[in-house]
Image (cartoon, helix red, strand yellow):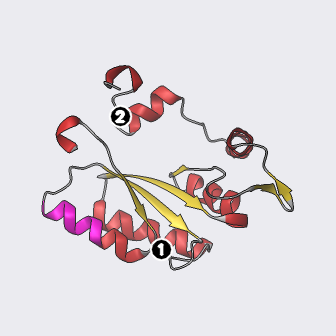
Amino acid sequence: MGDFGTRYEHECYDIGHLYNLAYFLDRKLLKPPVFVQSVFGILGGIGADPDNVMFMRRTADRLFGEDYVWSVLAAGRAQMPLISQAAMLGGNVRVGLEDSLYIGRGTLAESNAQQVEKIARILGELGLEVATPSEARAMLALKGKDNVKF
């Protein structure tokens, strides 16, 4: 798919996944920059803990240098705190009902949009800017809807 300009999201559920990704880069099976989605709080993966966010970030920095785009998702109640931490570390964030059904303690989210609005408010209060869709496509080297044939 790389021959057609397809970009991959590499979901890394544990530290070993970063090393696997580095192996593929070393063998030239992938082209940098790679999009690394660090996943926290999924059973069998790295725990949803602020120290683990730092560990994954430091390891990715050491393995990939400037050749990656980093994003974080966290499952369940850890969603907003951990992605806020990631954003403060210069990373990108992902929210959605796939990761957490709640908008707050004991309150089900009405939609993905409600979660996006919440994290946008949090990041705004922290003085961080949310990328526009065009800016996000540029950061991820995506060709955009108008340039695909489906």
Amino acid at circle 2: Leu
Say which mark, if any, is on residue 55.
1
Indicate the position of residue 26 as horizontal and vertical percent values: 16, 64
Residue at image point 20% right, 49% down: 31
- Residue 42 magenta-highlighted: no
Q: Residue furthest left?
A: 27
Would you say the magenta stretch is mainly helix, strand or loop? Answer: helix
Q: Is residue 101 left or right of residue 134?
A: right
Amino acid at circle 1: Phe
Residue 61, quarter of picture = bottom left
Q: Is residue 47 left or right of residue 70?
A: right
Residue at image point 33% right, 36% down: 141
Residue segment shown in magenta: 20-27
Q: Is residue 40 left or right of residue 105?
A: left
Q: Residues within 10 Å of mark 1 (few under 14, many from 20)?
A: few
Indicate the position of residue 4 as horizontal and vertical percent values: 21, 36
Q: Residues within 10 Å of mark 2 (few under 14, many from 20)?
A: some
Indicate the position of residue 1 as horizontal and vertical percent values: 22, 44
Q: Split into 4 quadrants, where in the image is the C terminus? A: top left
Q: Is residue 71 above or below residue 39?
A: above
Indicate the position of residue 14 as horizontal and vertical percent values: 44, 74
Q: Dot 2 lies on which element? A: loop
Q: Circle 2 is placed at which residue position?
A: 142
Q: Dot 1 lies on which element? A: helix
